[in-house]
Amino acid sequence: MLNLTRFGLLAVLLAAGCTDDAAAPFLGDWTYSTGEFRLDCGGQVMQFPLDASLVETFAAGTATDLAKSDTMGCAGITFEVAGRVARLAPSPQSCTIPGMGTSTAESYTFTLGDDDRTLVAASSGTLAIPGAPGACTFTGGGTLLQP
């Protein structure tokens, strides 16, 4: 009976060590291969292409699955992973983008491609620009690759 108990305990420990961390495929640097950021400020629409100069970096989070920073200066945005999708958690979240203003994302997702080397991003929210009469709305998205 004692050997069976040890065998059962060993099986549980081995199984626990083999669990798949859903956030692991998201970790690291990702660069845009295509994409666009669209800003609407009271009917004045501006579009900005997203390319390899914008890098999104994901690290393991402390209170959530992931924490993201990017080369635009936005840092500390957190995400929960469910399956192949990382979703903003909690929502909304804000960050300051130097030289632009305060971005508040209300919706933000990254969907991992079947190849584990492609992410599809989608976001929306508001951007408060200093001196502007009101907040601008934004939508953005694109395809990212690991370099």
Image: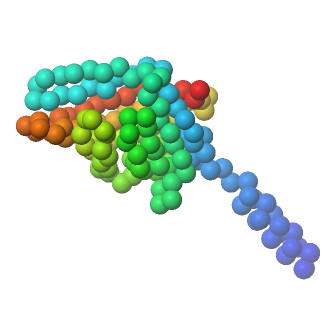
Of the pair 83 and 52, the residue shown nearer to us:
52
Q: Position of residue 80 (x, y in %)?
A: 46, 50
Of the pair 104 and 95, the residue shown nearer to us:
95
Residue at position x 47%, y 49% from top?
Answer: 67
* Residue 120 visible in the shown view: no
Q: Is residue 99 above or below residue 32?
A: below
Residue at position x 27%, y 35% from top?
Answer: 99
Of the pair 89 and 1, the residue shown nearer to us:
89
Residue at position x 11%, y 36% from top?
Answer: 132
- Relative to 74, 137 lies left or right: left
Give the farthest residue toward the left: 133
Report which quarter residue 136 is drawn in: top left
Q: Position of residue 140 (x, y in %)?
A: 33, 29
Which quarter of the rendering shows the N terminus?
bottom right
Q: Position of residue 86 (x, y in %)?
A: 47, 43
Q: Is residue 14 above or below residue 36?
A: below
- Relative to 2, 12 lies left or right: left
Residue at position x 31%, y 39% from top?
Answer: 97
